[in-house]
Amino acid sequence: MNIPECYFSRPAAVIASLKDAPDIASEFKRLDLAVADVGEPFVPYDVFDGSKNLPHRQFLRAYTFVDRTIGWYYHGGLGTHIHVFELRKQIDFEPGASREPVLRVTGASLSGPPCEATQALLDGVRGPNDW
């Protein structure tokens, strides 16, 4: 997949792999969301081969900003699209949590051209009805 180069209204650092973002990988696992890393096999279409147990999602990239992280993953299957989602540091109040801020998905997300969707989230768009 050809991943575009993006320019945003504020500075950002690029995260090119889940290996470089264990906090994002950990959040996917907490949400029970199977996501392959960049370059790993996944199912990009609707037909499923259960013998391989591959996810229908593949991480593409993330950007860290001062106040948030915005990530992208490709979602295969019927109605394939690039999903753009926001994460922010939050205190984890689950039993046994360390009370240190951890990265959590906020619920703000968009599908569509990833550079434009990222900028829209930065501009305060929270979901498809705002965009």
Image (cartoon, grey):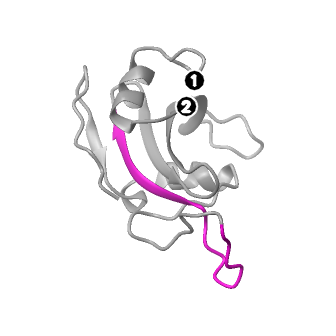
**Can see residue 100?**
no
Query: Which quarter of the figure has residue 5?
Result: top left
Q: Would you call the spot at circle 2 few (<14 residues within 10 Å), some (14-19), or many (20 or more)? A: many
* Mark closest to the chain's N terminus, 2 or 1: 2
The residue that mark 2 highlights is 109
- Real-space Cα distance between discs 2 and 1? 8 Å
The residue that appears at 66% across and 70% down in the rendered structure is: 47
Could you tell me residue 113's position as x and y percent?
39, 36
Any magenta on residue 2?
A: no
Front one among 116 and 60: 116
Above or below, comparing residue 49 to residue 82 in the picture? below
The residue that appears at 78% across and 43% down in the rendered structure is: 95
Could you tell me residue 109's position as x and y percent?
55, 31
Above or below, comparing residue 8 to residue 18 in the picture? above
What range of the chain is rendered magenta? 47-64
The amino acid on which the numbered mark 2 sits, given as a three-letter code, is Ser
The residue that mark 1 highlights is 128
